[in-house]
Image (cartoon, helix red, strand yellow):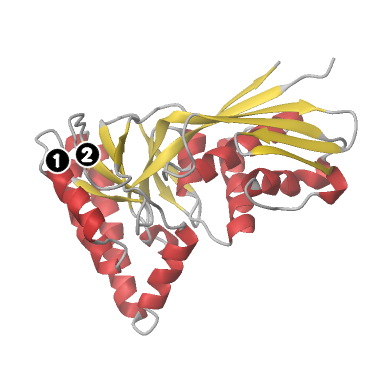
Amino acid sequence: MLVSYQASAPGSLMLLGEHAVLHGEKALVCALSKRITVTLLPRTDQQIVIRSDKGSFTTQLNQLAVTKPLQFVLGALVHYRANLQTGCELVIESEFSDQVGLGSSAAVTVATVAVIRAWLSYSMDKNELTNAAIAVIRAVQGLGSGADVAAAVYGGMIAYCAQPLQVETFSQLHPLTVVYSGYKTPTVEVVKHVQNTFAACPDILQRICLRIGACTQQAIQLLRAGRITACGEIMNRQQGLMEELGVSNPLLNKLVAYLCQQSTISGAKISGSGLGDCVIGWGKSDNLIFIENGVCSISVDMSAQGVLVFAE
């Protein structure tokens, strides 16, 4: 009887360091309580079958190609294709929508890479797993800091540097308020928007990224000192820098200001690349009322648990 394999990985949120992490600065990112699970059932033929809430997809091992909407799952299979002797069936189950900016691409990539590595009896070393998943994402979409990948692998709250790969883990967790703005702009598009905005003045972009990096470094020092609640004010500071980058807008500014008015929230900012997606508050507030179309609270918490792998 063939053994089946299962891996699950958490969603994630960028806390500090967006954009600057693509320019050599550190980012602060956390894993979330909502997860994506990938189950792998080995086959005896060459067929690849993928089942998810996006529908079913079937191809042959020697015809693998990266196509939407399963590009990250297919990208992981392509990454390991030379090592696969037979086909497999992959079943993908998610506790959150890929439309709300909770690191679904990283979570499904990490879970798929992990379950394939388990099938192949490869090492589950966290650095190796992180590097492999980042390679898949960059091959699929052309860029990616890897911060959300590292959070999905390690769990908890981490400080992340892309080059060279460095991950510092923190044992503390903190309550969060997460608000979806009603729409999202793909990260690659936002990064290109920033590049175009500052094409004639790259020195200004560099200075903003250095200041964002300084925000992350200050938060890291606070976390090392056990002063986790003080990170809220740093979020406020970085929000101003996100506005300087041109990745905020009146709706996002309004949502950030609304969160800052809550007595239980000490700071708020855009989470992720911006121009939509989520706004986060440092602290929990459950009594929020929104009148804007599509805007809603997302019930989610930080989680200490990173990727998990099982064999049956």
Which residue lies most toward the bottom here? 200
- Image marks 2 and 1: residues in contact by CB distance under 8 Å: yes
Locate the C terminus by quadrant: top right
Q: Is residue 306 visible?
A: no
Give the labeled residue for mark 2. Answer: 282
Place of residue 165 in the rendered image (x, y in percent of width and height, measured from the top left): 50, 51
- Which percent across, then down, holds residue 64? 79, 49
Residue bearing the label numbered 1: 266
Circle 2 sits in a helix, a strand or a loop, which is it?
strand
Element at label 1:
loop
Left or right of 109 on screen, residue 12? left
Task: Report if residue 9 is visible in the image.
Answer: yes
Q: At 22% from the left edge and 39% from the top edge, which residue is drawn?
A: 282
The residue most toward the right is 45
Residue 3 falls in image quadrant: top right
29 up-or-down from 33: above or below: below
Residue 15 image point, x, y percent: 32, 46
Left or right of 69, for residue 98: left
When asked about the image quadrant of residue 248, the answer is bottom left
Tag of residue 179: none
Q: Is residue 274 above or below residue 268?
A: below
Check disc 1 and give the amino acid type.
Answer: Ser
Q: Residues within 10 Å of mark 1 (few under 14, many from 20)?
A: many
Pick whichever of labels 2 and 1 is earlier in the sequence.
1
Q: Looking at numbered disc 2 in the image, what kind of residue is underneath it?
A: Trp
